Image (spheres, grey):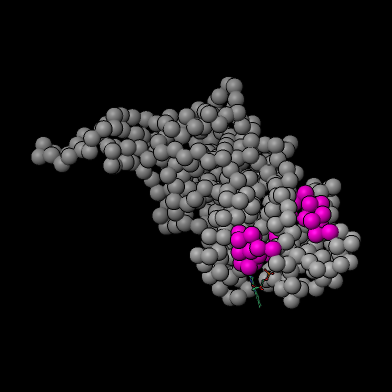
Amino acid sequence: MLSSKRILLIIGGGIAAYKSLDLIRRLRERGAAVTPVLTRAAEEFVTPLSVSALAGEKAYRDLFDLTDEAEMGHIQLSRSADLLVVAPATADLMGKMAGGLANDLASTLLMATDTPVLCAPAMNVRMWEHPANRRNHAQLKADGVRFVGPNEGDMACGEYGPGRMSEPLEIVAAIEAQLGTGPLSGKRILVTSGPTHEPIDPVRYIANRSSGAQGTAVARALAALGAEVVFVTGPAQVPPPDGVTVVQVETAQQMSDAVDAALPVDAGVFAAAVADWRMATASDRKLKKSRDGLPALDFAENPDILKRVAHLETNRPALVVGFAAETDNVIEHATAKRARKGCDWIVANDVSPATGIMGGSENAVVLIAEDGAEEWPRMGKDDVAKRLAARIADALGQ
Ligand SMILES: Cc1cc2nc3c(=O)[nH]c(=O)nc-3n(C[C@H](O)[C@H](O)[C@H](O)COP(=O)(O)O)c2cc1C
């Protein structure tokens, strides 16, 4: 809930401005007060009348409006809110914010405040990927501005890719997380992700095909619901999410140590593809080709992190979630794995090559809990993560 919270909503001039009308409605349903501000360009997409009618407040538009200054000066306007939300955040607004420009009401409000700012970018995929926008995005993140989205998908301009504004309810969740009123606020959750690399010698290692995409999406989704996330990741192919504490590791042993250091937590989600074996003794020199034949590699078993945490007598998380990558008899094998590991839930997926799941953007999972198996339809890894995060929030909230 957002009762007694005041959001200053800056609406930029993009097609997605129509979604900001629904956003206002959703925020008010949750008890928030919304003070809307439209840029000049935003007025081409939504009318100040609709915006102020939905907000139940005046829609501010002009920096040099003597009446507005008499009612509430622009400095006071920018500071009276608990959070400034820019939705849609146009390429132009992001550029102004990153460059410190203040030549209209919206950009001046953003400069004149130290209140936290959350941006929901929306723009054509080429604009999103333009080097200037990439620089502005990085600068704003470094300045402490938080982001929700953009999402990947079909765009109003007919193209496909990242740049689509997050849906109003996703923005609401990000606002709740930012204001500490999300369903997972106050909960500390550990997520492991990515593969591990087990050195053979200084230049070679044993690895697996995990990209880290699913674990990263889970960490992002949990943070979006307000959780404090400790993200322990092996060498993944995707960057870690924003707004989480990242612990980079390489080997299973390092991951195990990092997990211990992160405890206690309310829940642990073990999505990493941890190597089962390492070299009994990794060579400290590069192994050379030899006329005497092939090198003999002696394996040793790695720590079973999931099983160990699930059996902890002190500091066992209230909810322990494992992931199982199976190539056949998914439900049967994953059910057996749940019992063997002693965890509460197993999220099982079929990673046989034909599914394209390992390294791909989609996942088809079965959630196995004490009361049986629940098959989820095939969906994007982000959607799997959001559904799992919502289930975790329900479980921890009980
Ligand atoms: C039909 C149309 C749609 C637009 N959609 C977007 C958009 O989604 N994102 C964006 O960054 N700019 C978009 N623009 C360009 C912005 O409106 C333009 O950069 C404007 O100066 C932004 O002003 P503002 O940042 O003050 O709102 C669009 C322009 C037109 C004509």
Q: Which residue is nearer to you in this view: 345 or 119? A: 119
- In the rendered image, residue 110, in percent from the top left (x then y), is placed at 71, 58
Q: Is residue 223 visible?
A: yes
Quarter-wise, where is residue 11 in the image?
A: bottom right
Quick check: 22 above or below 299?
A: below
Q: Which residue is nearer to you in this view: 181 or 297? A: 181
Q: Is residue 45 visible?
A: no
Write the start and end of the magenta stretch as one range. 73-102
- In the rendered image, residue 367, in percent from the top left (x then y), is placed at 58, 45
Give left or right: position of 183 versus 331. Answer: right
Q: Is residue 99 magenta?
A: yes
Q: Quadrant location of ligand 1?
A: bottom right
Q: Is residue 16 magenta?
A: no
Quadrant in which the C terminus is drawn: top right
Q: Which residue is nearer to you in this view: 67 or 184? A: 67
- In the rendered image, residue 232, in percent from the top left (x then y), is placed at 51, 39
Give left or right: position of 37 versus 192. Answer: right
Residue at the left extreme? 291
Residue at image coords 11%, 36%: 292
Give left or right: position of 349 versus 390. Answer: left
Q: Which residue is nearer to you in this view: 74 or 156? A: 74
Q: How many marks?
A: 0
Give left or right: position of 77 versus 90. Answer: right
Residue at image coords 67%, 36%: 187
- In the rendered image, residue 102, in percent from the top left (x then y), is placed at 69, 63
Residue at image coords 86%, 58%: 72
Residue at image coords 61%, 51%: 143
Residue at the top extreme? 313
